[in-house]
């Protein structure tokens, strides 16, 4: 009852604050000697796929392997039937809330990782996601970990609490790692530290899959200034990034460009290879999908 009353009031305060973002003295108006921009840089790419054509050429020019991935829609439908998601997971049915996007990301991850009984698997920034239990139920994986900052710090059963670069797992001990719509929220240098941790804990031949991998023509940090102000959160904004404001109730979201793929990712993983995949038919599954790119990491 209290939540039903408080939430609309909070949302109204948030929206009013955001509406003042152009003049509000508590918000930054320039960053990196450039004006702060309103809007999501990913929308540029969704509206104009030729921007991703340019990114593909830039990757190849930088000697970063890139390939195309086509979603097997019938395979996705079959996966949904086997996974049997709980009804409280984004509405529990295709078309409800963000259910299709989240479950599609899970399914596509299974196309990159050869799940099996004897592997060690970790789902990073898992929060309340059922994906690790689906890996056990559908694919028979015996040893799974769920990692998230909201869990009690340290390894407690199958949960690992703390930052993703502080797993304390032994070196060369993990076969597969997934991140679903989560890397973009790693602030400051925690993304770089995480990739160094991936380099350490993956077994030879092991894989980490990040999807969507948020990738754009310009290195961009998105924040919601009203959300951060109301939560008294002070996001770390990289000096090299463009700064965008978005009205989406999130602290921080990072889009990499090709230079930052090399600088923040590849350079942190001397024992690993990276490859990017461009998803050709993500909008055929759901007209609001944003699964444009996938990052695959393999331990050499």
Image (tube, helix red, strand yellow):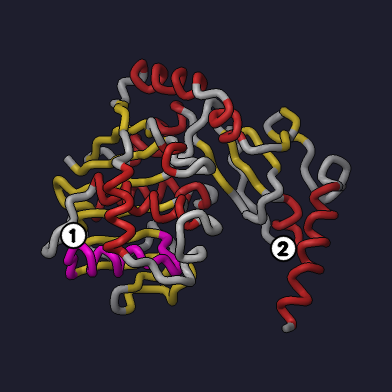
| Residue 171, image x, y percentages | 21, 57
Q: Is residue 148 visible?
A: no
Query: Can residue 214 be found in the magenta stretch?
Result: no
Q: Identify the secondary structure beneath mark 1.
A: loop
Could you tell me which residue is drawn at 76 percent across and 62 percent down?
A: 11
| Residue 64, image x, y percentages | 32, 25
Could you tell me which residue is drawn at 24 percent across and 45 percent down?
A: 112
Quadrant location, the N terminus: bottom right
The quadrant in which residue 79 appears is bottom left
Could you tell me which residue is drawn at 44 percent across and 19 percent down?
A: 53
Q: Identify the secondary structure beneath mark 2.
A: loop
Few, some or many residues within 10 Å of mark 1 (<14, 14–19, 20+): some
| Residue 212, image x, y percentages | 43, 43
Please give the range of residues in magenta: 125-142
Q: Is residue 204 visible?
A: yes
Residue pointed to by mark 2: 232
Name the foreground residue: 203 vs 97: 97
Name the foreground residue: 197 vs 214: 214
Residue pointed to by mark 1: 173
Side of 148 where 187 appears, left or right: right
The quadrant in which residue 55 appears is top left
Name the foreground residue: 298 vs 214: 214
Q: Which mark is residue 120?
A: none
Could you tell me which residue is drawn at 44 percent across and 41 percent down?
A: 291
| Residue 105, image x, y percentages | 39, 50
Residue 228 vs 208, above or below: the answer is below
Mark 1 to mark 2 CA distance (whole Å): 38 Å
């Amino acid at each position: 009852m209290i939540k039903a009353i408080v939430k609309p009031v909070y949302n109204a305060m948030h929206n009013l604050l955001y509406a003042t973002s152009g003049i509000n003295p508590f918000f930054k108006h320039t960053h990196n000697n450039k004006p702060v921009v309103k809007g999501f840089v990913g929308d540029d790419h969704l509206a104009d796929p030729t921007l991703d054509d340019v990114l593909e050429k830039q990757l190849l020019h930088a000697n970063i392997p890139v390939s195309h991935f086509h979603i097997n829609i019938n395979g996705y439908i079959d996966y949904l039937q086997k996974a049997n998601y709980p009804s409280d997971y984004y509405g529990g049915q295709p078309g409800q809330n963000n259910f299709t996007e989240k479950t599609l990301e899970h399914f596509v991850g299974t196309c990159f990782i050869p799940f099996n009984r004897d592997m060690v698997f970790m789902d990073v920034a898992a929060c309340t996601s059922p994906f690790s239990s689906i890996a056990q139920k559908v694919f028979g994986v015996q040893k799974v970990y769920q990692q998230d900052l909201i869990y009690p710090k340290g390894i407690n059963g199958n949960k690992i609490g703390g930052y993703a670069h502080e797993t304390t797992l032994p070196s060369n001990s993990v076969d597969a790692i997934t991140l679903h719509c989560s890397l973009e929220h790693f602030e400051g240098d925690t993304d770089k530290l995480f990739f160094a941790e991936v380099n350490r804990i993956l077994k030879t031949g092991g894989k980490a899959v990040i999807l969507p991998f948020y990738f754009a023509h310009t290195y961009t940090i998105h924040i919601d200034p009203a959300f951060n102000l109301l939560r008294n959160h002070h996001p770390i904004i990289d000096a090299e990034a463009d700064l965008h404001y978005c009205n989406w109730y999130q602290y921080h979201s990072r889009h990499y460009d090709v230079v930052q793929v090399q600088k923040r990712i590849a350079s942190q993983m001397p024992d690993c290879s990276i490859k990017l995949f461009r998803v050709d038919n993500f909008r055929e599954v759901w007209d609001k999908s944003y699964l444009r790119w996938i990052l695959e990491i393999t331990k050499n």
